[in-house]
Image: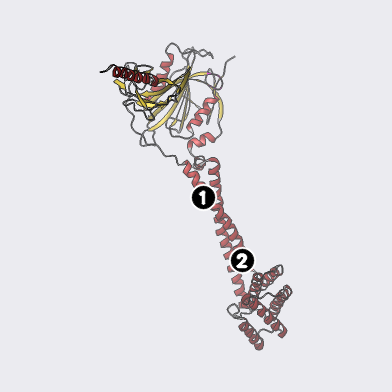
Amino acid sequence: MSKKGFICLIFFIWLNASGQIQKGVLTATVDTTAVKIGENIDYYLQIKVDSTSKVVFPEQPLFAPFELLEASQIDTIRSQSHFLYTKKYSLIHFDSGNYYIPQQQVLVDGFSQIAKLIPIRVNTVKVDTTKQKLFDIKPLQKVKRNYEDLIIKLAWFLFVVFVIVGILYTYFFQKNRKELKKQELPPFERAIEELKALENESLNKQEEFKRYYSRLTDVIRRYLKEEAKIDALESTSEELLLKLEMRKDAGTLDLDRKTLISLREVLQNADLAKFARSMTEFRIASEDRKVVETVVIETKEALPEPTEEELREKAAYQEFLAKKRRKQQWIYGLAGTSILGILTFLISILIYGYYPVRDSLLAYPTKVLYSGQWVMSQYGNPPIKIETPDVLERMKGDKNNVQQFAMGTLNSPFYIDLLFNFPNKKSSSNLKEDKDGKGAALINTVISSFESKGAVNILMKNDELELPSGLPVAKVYGTLDYPKKEKSDRVRCSFNALLFTFEEGTIILKMMYEKEDRYGSKIEQRIINSLELIKEL
């Protein structure tokens, strides 16, 4: 190689090396190389470049077998003419063993920078079975679906439907009532009343004149049919006038000739308004109503006195109409009461909720207890003041220094047991802190009392509780399966026991109710809030 070529080669190598330095070096670090199963690992990618370089971190980095929990934003620090870019990734793994975090690639001005592999040790979590009890896996339990939202939506739909039905019912009931009332009136009085109603009509349009004359002719036709026994409803105007002429000639209906002529003009005006769409003057329409009223009055006067048989038929017909009206009133009354009851039920659901309304109507046992009249009283010595749904009954005990009060039994919807155990009978209200194992013995006493009654699968927790009165107590609570008499299978129940420890003895308040009971926890909380230890003077 010539000297000139050697110099070019050296210059090219130096230029390439300086370019790599300018592009920066990628470093990868972690906060720890040894973690436990389920612990987070913070993985950092960091690169230092000049101010003109463009850095691109991987958009979807692969960290298998590790799982990516979170990727932070790029942190940028400026140092004179250089920039330091840092990106943090949170990783996790759920299997023990030795692993490597895969190499990651960062692009700097289109050139690829590769991070190194980092070894990670994932350790197992040791479990001391001598200190931590092991329990059997609980069987699957069916969870009842909550239909509250669906019921509320259905209640809104039914409410709107029944409101519409109620409005329609009121409209048709009033309309039918008026029609029945009109039918009970004698034909003459009903015709005069309908003609009086037409007197107040305002007529401006052709359709109004058409309805006016239709009602006007219906009045006279119906009256002639009912009183004069003339087939007037199915007859044309000319046929009706011909029948009246024949009755006049026969002497059975003595009407004045002028009246018949006036009635002919009224019928002609009515035919023109109904079929020829003509509009007469309001004055002529008013005179036509008076003519019809005159025809009705003269027909009433011209008719012979009714016979006894006709009077009986009329009376029987009136009685039939009265019975029909009373029957329809009963039907509409029952329908209205039903609609009102359903609307009241739906409104109550929308205001108070479905289950409170349903449980109130069906007298759900714990709902009755919760909504009933509670009793505030004092029991035992030192006395405990407590509010309960009913008075606690004194129970007979074998020991002289043990007092026990209870409401119901373990088979009851809600069970309360208040026990005073003071072997050294000295009244004291100074609570003693449980530091000598006395609390553990009391907890075992509570659990044993349930087990002796047949309870199984007892899951228990204990905690410290401060009552609203400021009194600190120990709390033991959880769930158990109890064989209630009225149930074929064991019932999952919730229990709660409050322990008051004194130097001379203990007070234990136990409560139990079905776990799925909607009101048990409310009753329990109300009882706890009312607890108060009466200090002796």
Q: Position of residue 310 (x, y in %)?
A: 61, 77
Residue that mark 2 sits on: 179
Q: Position of residue 104 (x, y in %)?
A: 34, 24
**Amino acid type of the residue that numbered disc 1 sits on in the rendered structure:** Leu
Exactly how many numbered labels are in the figure?
A: 2
**Disc on res. 21:** none
Q: Which quadrant does the C terminus fall into?
A: top right
Q: Is residue 361 something that shows in the picture? A: yes
- Asked whether the residues under the numbered discs 2 and 1 touch, taking CB atoms below 8 Å apart as contact, a structural biologist would say no
**Side of 270 relative to 393 (left or right):** right
Name the foreground residue: 420 vs 237.
237
Find the magenta span and give its range.
Answer: 467-471
State how the image is colored: secondary structure
Q: Position of residue 473 (x, y in %)?
A: 49, 19
Q: Position of residue 374 (x, y in %)?
A: 55, 31
Which residue occupies 50% across, 44% down? Answer: 152
Residue extending farthest to the top is 436
Q: Is residue 156 magenta?
A: no
Q: Secondary structure at mark 1?
A: helix
**Disc on res. 158:** 1
Which residue occupies 51% across, 34% down? Answer: 369
Q: Secondary structure at mark 2?
A: helix
Name the foreground residue: 187 vs 56.
56
